[in-house]
């Protein structure tokens, strides 16, 4: 799978195949996969739902940071969550605009 890799923390790295829209999170100093993500490939109306969306990953990250912040409150967690909510808002606005134009779920621009 390794077409590109990025160390994302002291403990993990992300390997990805952008063509296949697949990502694997692996320990830096061990073998195996601790998580994998497969993104939607193609427009839903044309290919059906076959993967997750960026919005899904943002929702998971927000939930996780909020849970961490309940146990170990941090200004940095709050800032990160605020930015993730901003990203969600931008994507929701994009979807609303595509719905208004009648092209949501298609590969039309």
Image (cartoon, grey):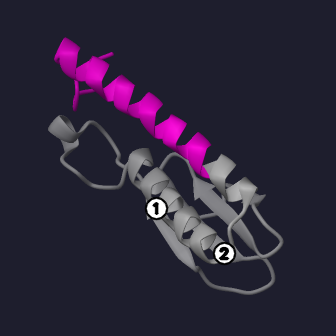
Let me know if residue 84 is in the magenta part: yes
Measuring from the top left, give residue 76's x and y in whole percent: 74, 55
Measuring from the top left, give residue 89's x and y in whole percent: 43, 33
Q: Quick check: 98 above or below 86?
A: above
Let me know if residue 102 is in the magenta part: yes
The kind of secondary structure element at disc 1 is helix
Q: Residues within 10 Å of mark 1 (few under 14, many from 20)?
A: few
The answer to which of marks 2 and 1 sits earlier in the sequence is 2
Q: Quick check: 5 above or below 100?
A: below
Residue pictured at 22% horizontal, 51% vertical = 49
The kind of secondary structure element at disc 2 is strand
Residue 15 image-quadrant placement: bottom right
Q: Which mark is residue 26?
A: 2
Q: Which mark is residue 60?
A: 1
Left or right for 61, reference 32: left
Which residue is nearer to you in this view: 78 or 51?
78
Q: Residues within 10 Å of mark 2 (few under 14, many from 20)?
A: many
Which residue is nearer to you in this view: 90 or 24?
90
Which residue is nearer to you in this view: 88 or 8?
88
Q: Quick check: 23 above or below 107?
A: below
Q: Which mark is residue 28?
A: none
Q: Which residues are magenta?
A: 81-109
Residue pictured at 50% horizontal, 46% vertical = 19
Measuring from the top left, give residue 31's x and y in whole percent: 69, 86
Measuring from the top left, give residue 93's x and y in whole percent: 37, 25
Residue pictured at 51% horizontal, 57% vertical = 62
Per the model, the C-alpha gap separating discs 2 and 1 is 18 Å
Q: Main secondary structure of the magenta part?
A: helix
């Amino acid at each position: 799978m390794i077409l590109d890799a990025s160390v994302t923390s002291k403990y993990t790295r992300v390997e990805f195949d952008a063509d296949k829209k697949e990502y694997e999170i692996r320990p830096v100093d061990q073998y195996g996969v601790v998580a994998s993500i497969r993104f939607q490939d193609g427009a839903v109306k044309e290919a059906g739902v076959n993967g997750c969306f960026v919005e899904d990953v943002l929702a998971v990250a927000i939930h996780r940071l909020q849970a961490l912040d309940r146990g170990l409150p941090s200004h940095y967690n709050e800032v990160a969550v605020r930015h993730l909510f901003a990203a969600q808002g931008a994507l929701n606005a994009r979807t609303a605009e595509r719905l208004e134009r009648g092209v949501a779920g298609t590969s039309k621009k």
